[in-house]
Image: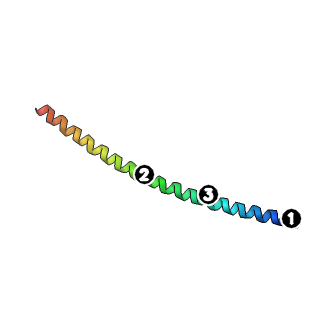
Amino acid sequence: MSDEKVDLNLLDSRLLTLTAEFRDLQQRFSAMESRLGAIEGRLTGIEGRIGGMEQRFAIHEDSM
């Protein structure tokens, strides 16, 4: 009986460790996801600005 309790205690501690590590990974991926979302937003803004510049240059070229 005492061997089974030791094995269950070891299993329990390993499971708690894995659960904590999994939570840590989830938090890290969530942080990375939000950072990538922010970068994507910035790139979309830059893309819009470049599109506006292209339109202005095209209008300028046509007027020349």
Give the residue drawn at x 30%, y 46%. Answer: 46
Circle 3 residues within 10 Å: few <14, some 14–19, many ≥20: few
Per the image, the residue denoted by label 2 is 37
Q: Secondary structure at mark 1?
A: helix
If you read the primary sequence from the N terminus, does the residue marked by circle 1 or circle 2 appear first? 1
Q: Are marks 1 and 2 in contact (CB under 8 Å)?
A: no
Image quarter of the N terminus: bottom right
Label 1 to label 2: alpha-carbon separation: 51 Å
Q: Camera-side residue: 56 or 32?
A: 32
If you read the primary sequence from the N terminus, does the residue marked by circle 3 or circle 1 appear first? 1
Q: Camera-side residue: 3 or 57?
A: 3
Circle 2 residues within 10 Å: few <14, some 14–19, many ≥20: few
Q: Is residue 35 left or right of residue 55?
A: right
Give the residue drawn at x 15%, y 33%. Answer: 61
Q: Nearer the viewer, mark 1 or mark 2?
A: 1
Say what amino acid the circle numbered 2 marks: Gly
Q: Position of residue 56 (x, y in %)?
A: 18, 39
Give the residue drawn at x 57%, y 56%. Answer: 25
Per the image, the residue denoted by label 3 is 22
Say what amino acid the circle numbered 3 marks: Phe
Q: Secondary structure at mark 3?
A: helix
If you read the primary sequence from the N terminus, does the residue marked by circle 2 or circle 3 appear first? 3
Indicate the quadrant where residue 53 lies.
top left
Q: Position of residue 33 (x, y in %)?
A: 48, 52
Indicate the quadrant where residue 20 lies.
bottom right
Give the residue drawn at x 52%, y 57%. Answer: 28
Label 3 to label 1: alpha-carbon separation: 28 Å
Q: Secondary structure at mark 2?
A: helix
Per the image, the residue denoted by label 1 is 3
Q: Position of residue 2 (x, y in %)?
A: 87, 68
